[in-house]
Amino acid sequence: MPLKDFSLLREVLDSAHNGILMVDDTGEVVVFNRAAGRVTGHDPKDVVGHNYGEFEPEVWDDMRRILVTGQPQVARRTLSGAGTMIFGNRTPVYLDGKIMGVISVFQDATEYERVLNELHAYRQLSEQLDVIIDSSYDGLWISDAEGKVVRVNPASERFAGVNAKEVIGRNVSELVEAGYFDRSVTLEVLKHQAAVSLIQQSKDGRQVLVTGNPVFDEKGEISLVVINARDLTAMKRLQEDLEHSRALTDQYRSELTHIHRQDELSSRLVMRSREMQRIFEMAMKVARVDSCVLLQGESGVGKGVFAKLIHGASPRSEGPLVRVDCGGIPPSLIEAELFGYARGAFTGARSEGKTGYFGLADGGTLFLDEVGELPLLMQTKLLRFLEENEVVPVGSTTPRKIDVRVLAATNRDLEKMVQAGTFRKDLYFRLNVVPINIPPLRQRAEDIPHLIGHFLGIFNQKCGKEMKVAPAVVDRLRRYCFPGNVRELANLIEHLVVLSPGETIELGDLPAEVRQTPFELSPEHHGDAWDLAEAVARTERELIARAIAEYGSQRAAAEALGVNHSTLSRKAKRYGLHVANMQRGANLQH
């Protein structure tokens, strides 16, 4: 039905205080009420039925955009009349979901202050407009002063499980009796002459929060009751969805932070071998929890570096990381150093007492390096702390709670020490919750070139040089077994940067024991003078010598080489190799 056929609507709008202009989708003026004529000075009879562009072409071009976009226009210039500037709010008019025209409510700019004071009345009027009522997400019921339903919006139909045709024109008391809902807020508003809120049970079992507001006329009597209904079931679901979304957001933020921190930490660690990358990923996983970690590996493989990485990636990264060299503390002082002591605990003690390493690490991480060197008595006290998180300082009887995560490291075989009775079995299992075994450098030769470049950059900067490394040197170092692991490589690069005569480190700059690897024939055997038996014997001697120097005994070296102890002993005697000499030689290299 065209807008111009709304004769009843025109009569209602004719009594409005504000000027109201309504055009159809062609621009033809459908409504031009008395107030519009009073404000503009135009006779409504001269305007209705004419195209609005005849009066205000520019304004009509502006308003026509609403028919295309559906976007309202607020505080726009509408008409000029009698030396005044008239502003209006323009809104699209929908019919059956389509824009059929534009309605403009306007007034003289000089009346704006008064209009603002009457904003509440204007909102009451606007609530009756179809666009506002039908587009509301909340349910809206409008009843008259007798409790008869005059309007129900689509949201209310959805909440209450009813059809508007079923309830419009019926009294709310009748609807309560029919079971549409258990009680009526409209009747409560009419009874108390004031706003009322309550929770209704709808026909289909929904819980709906309903608020009724009375609308008073000029005589102070209720003319309408406007009911706002909100589905609590839907609200609860939305709240749960919101909380779930927030939880996911927090989780994603935490994951991103962890990934960024992991990327930052991985940039500090030189690793290219797949095994080292696997160990790094394991360390990052365990860093997020407080489980004990036992770092195992030969001296110089980087156990301390991994301890720093785990602490840096943990929730305790803002706390202290305290490293304790368990093998470097005298047995007589180790308890006081670890747990601290009270004032006057023993002769020579500080008068104010001392906080031990555990206390210094409170809120952070305690790294027990070479934990296998702890005396049995201290192993017992360490186990007690791991189980109870309490320490008792020397000379005190009062336990102190300490919040510390413990990381431990060793280059010794703790399982064999447990079997030998030199390390507590229960402490071993308590420390070995997450074991991380770091392979020696000789088992990850692909890392060596990158480590060479890393250390070369460090020591070039330290010494103010720009040294380079010849490819032959890199190749030779890849084949060297590095009994001192990464620490030995770092010391070797520093040695070469400091002492190499040229700008490039050549093969001849390497120490003799590095130049001739176990699998490299000496110069005097190059050419045609090949002797396979002699080469095998020389290689065998070199391997046995290195194994004895590294493991400290023939028995341990035999186990590492995979031969019988008596066999290795016989070969060592043949080659003139002795444990004391091998250890002394290893110490001289370091």
Image (cartoon, rainbow, N blue to C red):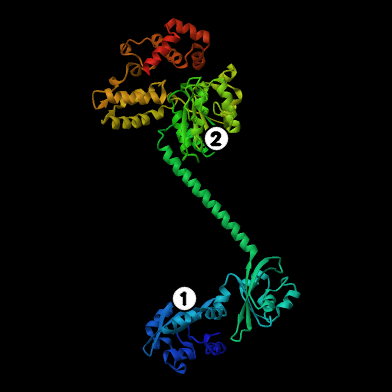
Instruction: Note whether 113 is above or below 415 in the view shown.
Output: below
Instruction: Estimate how packed mark 2 is, as few (under 14), some (14 to 19) or many (20 or more) residues with alpha carbons within 10 Å.
Output: some
Mark 1 near mark 2, Cβ–Cβ under 8 Å? Answer: no
Of residue 580 and residue 381, the one placed in the foreground of this image is 381
Residue 315 pos. (x, y %): 50, 41
Q: Quadrant of the C terminus?
A: top left
Of residue 357 and residue 551, the one placed in the foreground of this image is 357
Residue 253 pos. (x, y %): 49, 49
Instruction: Note whether 255 is above or below 101 in the view shown.
Output: above
Instruction: Estimate how packed mark 1 is, as few (under 14), some (14 to 19) or many (20 or more) residues with alpha carbons within 10 Å.
Output: some
Q: Can residue 95 be seen in this view?
A: no
Q: Which mark is drawn over residue 72?
A: 1
Q: What is the spatial separation of the Cα atoms under label 1 and label 2, in whole angstroms?
A: 65 Å
Q: Mark 2 is on which residue type?
A: Ile
Q: Residue furthest left?
A: 502
Mark 2 or mark 1, which is nearer the start of the sequence?
1
> Which quarter of the figure has residue 521?
top left
Horizontally, residue 245 falls left or right of residue 189, namely left
Q: Is residue 400 visible?
A: yes
Of residue 490 and residue 337, the one placed in the foreground of this image is 337
Residue 169 pos. (x, y %): 68, 82
Q: Which mark is drawn over residue 402?
A: 2
Horizontally, residue 408 falls left or right of residue 75, namely right
> Which quarter of the figure has residue 387?
top right
Q: Which mark is drawn over residue 453?
A: none
Instruction: Note whether 84 is above or below 436 in the view shown.
Output: below
Q: Which residue lies furthest to the right in this view?
A: 177
Q: Mark 1 is on which residue type?
A: Pro
Horizontally, residue 420 falls left or right of residue 78, namely right
> Which quarter of the figure has residue 481?
top left
